[in-house]
Image (cartoon, grey):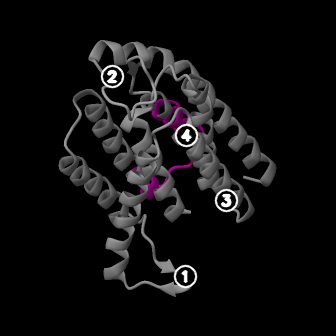
Amino acid sequence: MNEYTVIGVVVAAFIAAGVLSYFFTPPVKRFAHKVGAIDVPKDNRRMHKEPIPRLGGLAIFGGFLCSILVFGQLDQTMLCVLLGATIIVVLGILDDILTLNALPKFAVQIVAAVIAVLHGCRIEHFMGFRLATWLSYPVSVIWIVAITNAVNFIDGLDGLAAGVSAISAGSMLVVALLVPDYNSAILLAAIVGACAGFIPYNFNPAKIFMGDTGSTFLGFMLSSISIYG
């Protein structure tokens, strides 16, 4: 593809993910009410006063996935990253509904990261130095799991995690276009679009939260694409 064609595909991926995420959110909100994925304010740490449905990340994931299945050029490595991301999303759905303990969540996150790392999503260079193969595997897994949880930890204010993730992905998108790394650019455009489509429902006062489903998915994808690219 030439430069102009790629930019067109990137824009299309952004728009498709945004539109789909926007229209997926209301049915996801109704689904969250049906399955009991509701964040009830039980203490003073909660900024909201009324019960708010979680699971908004399912709309983000749906918009992103549909977009890249149409516009993305997925190789084996990225397909395995998407498999890991799907595991993360399933884990997030269960956590948003059932509130799982930290240890099993952490274990599943490691499994998802290992799947991606074993299939090529691996840090091979760090600060100008080439990592030994035996070291690159654990470093890559630690990076993916750490960023996955970092995005999860900042999901405490309305619109914060979605906004930060969109800005981060947007910054990486600019770099990917300059390098150029068009495959990563399309993936990042879909992430920015999916976040943008969800944010109108997540601005203060939020009508729905992305929950662990969204925050861990975004963290997993941002960390994985930063290695993949």
Amino acid tagged 3: Ala
Can the viewer see residue 174 in this picture?
A: yes
Amino acid tagged 2: Val
The residue that label 2 is drawn on is: 40
Give how far apart the Cα atoms at labels 2 and 3 are: 40 Å
Q: The C terminus lies in which quarter of the figure? A: bottom right
| Quarter of the view holding residue 113 | bottom left
The percent position of residue 35, horizontal first and vertical second, equals 27, 17
The residue that label 4 is drawn on is: 160
Give how far apart the Cα atoms at labels 2 and 4 are: 19 Å
| CB atoms of marks 4 and 1 within 8 Å | no
The relative height of residue 168 versus residue 128 in the rendered view (above or below) is above
| CB atoms of marks 2 and 4 within 8 Å | no
Give how far apart the Cα atoms at labels 4 and 3 are: 24 Å
Nearer-the-camera pick, 34 or 12 = 34
For marks 1 and 3 on the same chain, the one whose residue lies earlier in the sequence: 1
Q: Residues within 10 Å of mark 2 (few under 14, many from 20)?
A: few
